[in-house]
Image: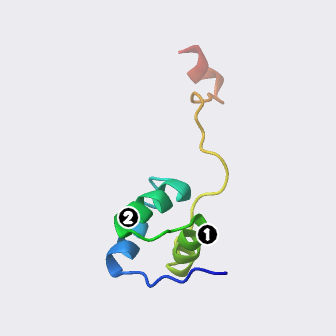
Amino acid sequence: MRIYKKWSSEELCFIAENCNKMKDKELAALLSERSGSKVTVDMLRRQRRKLQIRKKRGRPFKGEKICLDQKEAQT
């Protein structure tokens, strides 16, 4: 059984402002607490796609800066 939710403009703005700062799972948990109704990750992703907001694919780079130029490596 699917859960249908009418999204408020405040919730949609919250998604748009925080989608690049947080993971979908974290956003769904926050929206569930705020709205009082259950918001799943799939519901959140569907709304993000309807708003035409894309996230970067893959894992974020957490390593040190890689020097490709040998002159920079020596200094």
Going from the N terminus, do you reach mark 2 or mark 1 first? 2
Quadrant where the image shows the N terminus:
bottom right
Q: Amino acid at mark 2?
A: Glu
Q: Quadrant of residue 68 in the image?
A: top right
Q: Does residue 55 appear left or right of residue 20 in this picture?
A: right
**Residue 38 drawn at (x, y percent):** 49, 68
Which residue extends farthest top? Answer: 74
Classify mark 2: helix, strand or loop.
helix
Instruction: Using residue 47 as the reference point, say whether residue 15 is left or right of it.
Output: left
Q: Which amino acid type is shown beneath numbered disc 1?
A: Asp
Q: Considering depth in this image, is 59 or 22 the residue closer to the camera? A: 22
Q: CA distance from mark 2 to mark 1?
A: 18 Å
Location of residue 24 by image quarter = bottom right
* Viewer-side residue, 5 vs 45: 5
Residue for point 44% across, 53% down: 21
Q: Is residue 66 left or right of residue 7?
A: right
Disc 2: which residue = 17
Check the image and report above or below for 10 versus 66. below
Residue at the disc numbered 1: 42
Q: Nearer the viewer, residue 69 or 5?
A: 5
At label 1, counting other C-alpha atoms closer than 10 Å, the crowd grade (few under 14, some 14-19, many 20 or more) is few
Color style of the picture: rainbow
Q: Secondary structure at mark 1?
A: helix
